[in-house]
Image (cartoon, coloured by chain):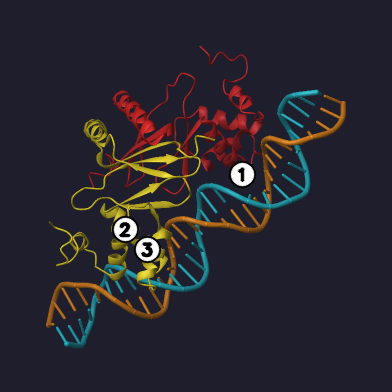
Chain colours: A yellow, B red, C cyan, D orange
DNA sequence: CTTGATAATGGAAACCATTTTCAATAGGAG
DNA sequence: CTCCTATTGAAAATGGTTTCCATTATCAAG
């Protein structure tokens, strides 16, 4: 039970220290905000949430930290086509968050789904293996999204 | 053999007329540029290519036309993470172009691959069917990309 | 518990891809 | 050929993201 017992530093501290990065209040706050939601937050969303906790944290720092988290592999960055990037914690220590997205091209709604994930993941692993070998490419992640009209939009 | 015999209007004219859109020189030129390359062109790339043919066509029109083509389903719009959108003709009348992408997160290189496409497509079709039913979602397209370090970048 | 090197921060300004505005132009039905 | 109106192009506006740089805070060493 590596998480949630309230003692010791949060699990992600090691990831920062191990990467040679300092632990700061903005970074701590930003990861906390991300870890407490399952929504697809934009940089500004994160900024607003973080601002409620420490009103002195700037938008620039939010952008910088999110970018750092993406590079560290702690966060995924998505583009749902509305002109702003969205960020999600890639997964907790248990890997309980992995999902793909359904994006409505009419209203912009995004649905997370985990159905069929197992079959997809299995095929993806095979594909990744084949592609890695053929193109000598070190694959670290994948992106799968489906586009179309959602429930509310396809009735008219 | 619906294409390449040099007689009659290009095959995409019908798509415009059918949608209630006029055929204009800028639109004709832009589709032509896209149909003659297998690269991932940005709006500016398209603009420059188009500009060589008709120097009076403006960047605004390029953006507008590309957006229209995306809505018509003739063009796919991609985000490879470099801050500008990329456009590709979705496919010729024979469907000979479908492929997915490998994106290098170090240098930005993008490799098209068609290997394993058949298995992927089959799984995708099943998944689409399941998702459509479960979420009452009308799926029209999908996006699959793998990320990692390419040949040149993973040797350090 | 200090100190000091330097990583990190934040506010303002810069950047730059994309969109909007609007008067001029051109497609194509009748 | 004419007219209606979709389309265009140049310039200006927009807005998400980055850069600049002086100030502040982290944390290893003493």
Q: Kindly state the secondary structure of the residue where label 2 is placed.
A: helix
**How dense is the environment of label 3, judged by Cα within 10 Å: few (below 14), some, or many (20 and up)?**
many
Q: Is there any visible trace of residue A50 in the rendered image?
A: yes
The residue tagged 2 is A34
Q: In the image, what residue occupies the spot 58% across and 33% down? A: B30
Give the alpha-carbon distance from disc 3 to disc 2, as whole Å.
Answer: 12 Å
The residue tagged 3 is A62
Residue A6, relative to residue A93: is it above or below?
Answer: below
**How dense is the environment of label 1, judged by Cα within 10 Å: few (below 14), some, or many (20 and up)?**
few
Q: Is there any visible trace of residue B115 in the rendered image?
A: no
Percent position of residue D28, x then y:
15, 72
Disc 3 sits on a residue from what chain? Answer: A
Q: Nearer the viewer, residue B141 or B46?
A: B141
Q: In the image, what residue occupies the spot 38% across and 69% down? A: A52
Image check: A122 left or right of C27? left
Q: Quadrant of residue A69?
A: bottom left
The residue tagged 1 is B60
Q: Kindly state the secondary structure of the residue where label 3 is placed.
A: helix
Q: Nearer the viewer, residue A34 or B33?
A: A34
Q: Residue furthest top?
A: B1
Percent position of residue A59, x then y:
41, 65
Query: Which is closer to the viewer, label 1 or label 2?
Result: 2
Image check: A126 left or right of B57? left
Percent position of residue B99, x then y:
38, 29
């Amino acid at each position: 039970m590596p998480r949630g017992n309230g003692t010791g530093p949060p699990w992600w501290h090691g990831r920062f220290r191990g990467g040679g990065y300092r632990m700061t209040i903005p970074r701590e706050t930003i990861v906390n905000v991300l870890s407490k939601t399952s929504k697809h937050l934009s940089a500004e969303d994160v900024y607003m949430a973080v601002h409620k906790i420490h009103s002195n944290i700037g938008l620039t720092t939010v952008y910088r930290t999110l970018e750092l988290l993406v590079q560290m592999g702690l966060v995924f960055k998505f583009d749902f086509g509305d002109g702003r990037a969205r960020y999600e914690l890639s997964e907790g220590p248990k890997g309980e968050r992995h999902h793909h997205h359904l994006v409505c091209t009419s209203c912009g709604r995004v649905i997370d789904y985990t159905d069929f994930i197992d079959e997809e993941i299995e095929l993806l692993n095979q594909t990744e293996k084949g592609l890695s070998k053929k193109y000598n490419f070190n694959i670290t992640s994948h992106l799968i999204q489906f586009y179309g009209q959602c429930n509310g939009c396809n009735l008219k």
